[in-house]
Amino acid sequence: MDNKKAGAESDIGMCLGLVQGVRNTMLFTEPLLDQKHRTCWPTDGIDNGQAVRIVLQYLRSNPASLHQDEVLLMMLAFRKAYRCAK
């Protein structure tokens, strides 16, 4: 395996792990938040593939925000996708 391919595979794994970690942390901490800061996840959940697509769509739609912390950007993406009804 050449170095380019190994680097790409490592980047993919890192991305998936980070997305899953942020999503799981958000799910775990939801009960501690007041209603206006909660994310209303689908009752049957989402998988990593869907989570990555949500984050990518958010990043592509908000290029001026790309300088911000990656964890914050993921949280904003999930909150936008699964905004709770007021």
Image: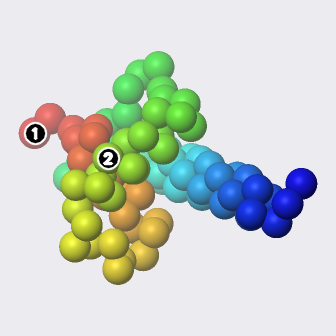
Query: Which residue lies at the image location 39% right of the left edge and 67% below the top edge?
Result: 72
| Residue type marked 1 | Lys
Residue 22 vs residue 69: left or right?
right
Of residues 85 and 18, the one drawn nearer to the viewer in this rendering: 18
Q: Secondary structure at mark 2?
A: helix
Q: Position of residue 50 (x, y in %)?
A: 46, 33
User: What quarter of the picture does the C terminus occupy?
Assistant: top left
| Residue type marked 2 | Gln
**Is label 1 or label 2 in front?**
2
Residue 4 vs 32, above or below: the answer is below
Q: Secondary structure at mark 1?
A: loop
Which residue of the protein is positioned furthest toward the right in this rendering? 1
Mark 1, residue position: 86
What is the crowding at mark 2: few (fewer than 14 residues within 10 Å), some, or many (at least 20)? few
Mark 2, residue position: 57
Q: Position of residue 28 (x, y in %)?
A: 54, 48
**Residue 29 visible in this rendered orientation of the protein:** yes
Q: Position of residue 32 (x, y in %)?
A: 42, 54
Mark 1 and mark 2: Cα distance apart in space: 24 Å
